[in-house]
Image: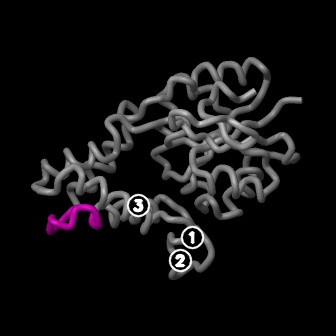
Amino acid sequence: MSRIFVFDAVHTILRPMPDVVSAYFLAGQRHGSELSKQDVKKRFRIARRQRFGTYVVASQTHPGSLPSSDEIERMLWRDLISDVFEDLDRVDELFEQLWLHFAMAENWQLYDDVEECWSRLHANGDRIVVASNFDSRLLDIVAKHPTLALADAVYCSAEVGFRKPDPRFYETVATLFGIKDSDEVIMIGDDFENDYVAPGRFGWRAFHLNRKHGVRPDERVISCLSQLS
């Protein structure tokens, strides 16, 4: 029986190159920011947690839910950039530059283990789905990476209407892809809550991908995609 492998995108199969902090720091400098790279890193982490943390998004108007759309995602990233670059009076042009930067496929690099893993799964007759908290820019990014053409479907939260770990994210992905039997599904991703705990509650088998050096794989954790079988 063929299986359905559902992969997260960012830091699971794709990573930004240069990394987010470097891209923000360099762009900020061009727009007159005097923040150090370490300041940008610290402020980005705080703002990312505040703007995108579990059950934070739109919580004032939608308690207990995580709605997503291109408009919501764009607003959240614009607000995050304003949070990070507190020393700039206006961030509109900076935001547009960074939004376009991360829309370009050449600024996203595949992890080395993706091609071998996906080719093997495809040869085995398994189906491959990408399902990620992202806006519609993800669709073009995936389309421009030849290896990712093996994906049978790509779903971003902006299209699904909800962000992980909202249960409706997994429910909608299952409906859109026509998943009838949860036992067929295996989810893989780098976020423990979004990609392991929440899909597990929905009845999917899942693996937490932790690429840190020295991590020992077990029944719930893998350190590279080559450990999928």
Q: Pointer 3: what residue?
A: 48
Q: Are marks 2 and 3 in contact (CB under 8 Å)?
A: no
At x 68%, y 50%, the residue is 196
Q: Are marks 1 and 2 in contact (CB under 8 Å)?
A: yes
Q: CA distance from mark 1 to mark 2?
A: 6 Å
Question: Tag 1's secondary structure?
Answer: loop
Q: Pointer 1: what residue?
A: 55
Neighbourhood count class around disc 3 (C-alpha, 10 Å): few under 14, some 14–19, many 20 upward: some
Say which amino acid is labelled 2: Ser
Q: Pointer 2: what residue?
A: 59
Q: Nearer the viewer, residue 127 or 223?
A: 223
Q: Where the C terminus falls, by quadrant?
A: top right
Residue 174 locus on image (x, y percent): 76, 50
Using the rendered view, name the quadrant where residue 83 is placed: bottom left
Residue 211 locus on image (x, y percent): 54, 36
Say which amino acid is labelled 1: Tyr
**Span highlighted in magenta in the image:** 82-91
